[in-house]
Amino acid sequence: MTDLGLAPADLIVAAGTPLGVRDHGRHPRLGDGGWSGDVLLVPGARGTADEWDAAAALLRGLGYRPVVVEPRGHGRSGAGDWSWPAVVADLEAVARALDLDRPAVVGRGLGGAIAAFWAGAHPECPLAVSIDGYGNPTRPEQLASLPDDDPAARVAEFSAFLAAALQDVPATLSQALRAVEDLDVLALHGAVLAPTVVLLSSESDLADVLPAELGLVWLAYLDWVRGALATVPQIEVMTIPGSNDAYLSNPEQLAGVLAELLPAPAAPLPA
């Protein structure tokens, strides 16, 4: 149930593959005028619509219409070949099916990259927000802060570790994670055409679950990401306290940040 006592609607929307969608709906007493407040929310890799429930309920209470889309290969969505244009087209199909008005797009991790790709294809988008939507280390210069005399070897070790972890992963998810690994972070964010904010978590839970030496590689890469994204004039970069799952563990914080960033929706009518 939402904080307004209304259950969100779980739907299957026809797109390039059937997509699992959770529509949290609009505040029942919204007035007319202004932006509709439609917001597409996209989970991270291996995520489902459930993880956005708390933050979505808070956003709905503020007058937004949160709609969670499970990317192909995730949750209730069907499988299908993964490509960034295909996934953006999936979101476009959801926006048409639900008659969304210039939706903002917010995603975490894999979903954050999707939000940035959306911003590169939809200049009318009022805001795209990428929460930790970056790829993986692929070049030695991305590990400049690592006290190591062979960063190229560390990059190769990191890539080999991820490849081994993907051996038993379903095909669509494997394609998605490999696409994330191949991301050119600077090119992706340098190509946005809509207002875009990158939220970077101050801590990384991934560093804690990787083998110790690869955790250090990951932290060095994050140092590079923070510095590199700060040079992209088309975007705004902000740091939010907590680890990568802050939108799960502290949805009030995230909803507050998003409410400050997003345009105001049509105001609720007096009771």
Image (cartoon, grey):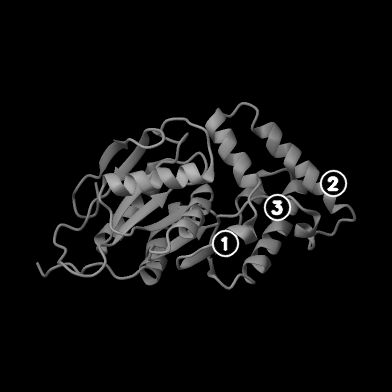
Q: Residues within 10 Å of mark 1 (few under 14, many from 20)?
A: many
Is any part of residue 249 visible from this angle? no
Q: Are marks 1 and 3 in contact (CB under 8 Å)?
A: no
The residue type indicated by label 1 comes to His
Residue 41 can be seen in this image:
yes
Confirm or deny contact between disc 1 and disc 2 (CB under 8 A). no
Relative image position of residue 52 (x, y in whole percent): 38, 49
Q: Quadrant of residue 69?
A: top left
**Residue 189, labelled with which disc?**
1
| Coordinates of residue 88 in the picture (x, y in percent) | 45, 47
Task: Locate residue 164 relative to residue 99 in the image: left or right.
Answer: right
Q: Which residue is mark 2?
A: 153
- Judging depth in this view, the residue of 236 and 90 nearest the camera is 90
Identify the element where label 2 is drawn: helix
Residue 29, percent from left and from top: 13, 61
Mark 3 residue type: Trp
Question: Relative to residue 157, is residue 182 drawn left or right?
Answer: left
Q: Label 2 sits on what residue type?
A: Ala
Q: Nearer the viewer, residue 225 or 86?
A: 86
Mark 1 secondary-structure assignment: helix
Q: Residue at x 39, y 62 (%)?
A: 125
Front position among marks 3 and 2: 2
